[in-house]
Amino acid sequence: MRSPWIRGRLVAVLLLAAIACSRNKPGAAPEPRPEPIPLHVKNENFLDMNIAVVISGVSRRLGQVSGNSSADFKIDWMLTVGQSIVITATPIGGRGFASSGSLSVGEGQMIEFLVASTLRQSVATVRNP
């Protein structure tokens, strides 16, 4: 009577050991995280601009671009997966804003945002670097 009980227990222990070993595979490497999305902003307006990215209705400030100059920013890829984004430029000490419109960015692509001297004429493009 004791032998079936011992065999059952031994099988259970061996099964648990096999499961524990199968979870920790030393050869499996984690998937690499995608690179951040590069954003190049060229400000052709004489006013300094605050630059922000809007994802799912939430605005996140990226930084500032001085008048008649350029700046580069990075947008975390994990924030944008499967969602369209909008880039905005708001003048410091002025009125109005410039918007890129809705952009769909794929992995490995970049955004170029031209802030025109007349804000409503601003344009953004998504391209491969």
Image (tube, grey):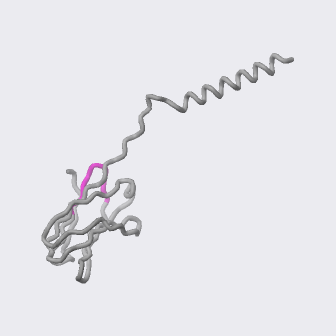
Q: Residue at x 72, y 21 (%)?
A: 10
Compared across the picture, whether 104 is left or right of 7 comes to left
Q: Quadrant of residue 114?
A: bottom left
In x, y percent, where is residue 26?
Answer: 46, 29
- Location of residue 127 with respect to 101 vertically, above or below: above
Q: Is residue 109 above or below residue 93?
A: above
Q: Position of residue 35 (x, y in %)?
A: 31, 49
Instruction: State the residue at coordinates (30%, 65%).
Output: 62
Q: Nearer the viewer, residue 119 or 25?
A: 25
Which residues, given as a range, are shown in magenta?
Answer: 104-112
Left or right: residue 92 versus residue 46 is right
Which residue lies at the image location 30% right of the left edge and 62% below the top edge? 103
**Along the line of sight, the residue nearer the viewer: 27 or 103:** 27
Q: Is residue 68 above or below residue 108?
A: below
Give how far across and how far down residue 2 sits, in percent: 84, 18
Q: Is residue 4 left or right of residue 107?
A: right
> Residue 122 colored magenta?
no
Q: Say which residue appears at 59% left-offset and 30% top-offset.
A: 20
Measured from the top left, where is residue 32 in percent x and y?
A: 37, 42
Q: Main secondary structure of the magenta part?
A: loop
Q: Residue furthest right?
A: 1
Classify the position of the N terminus by image quarter: top right
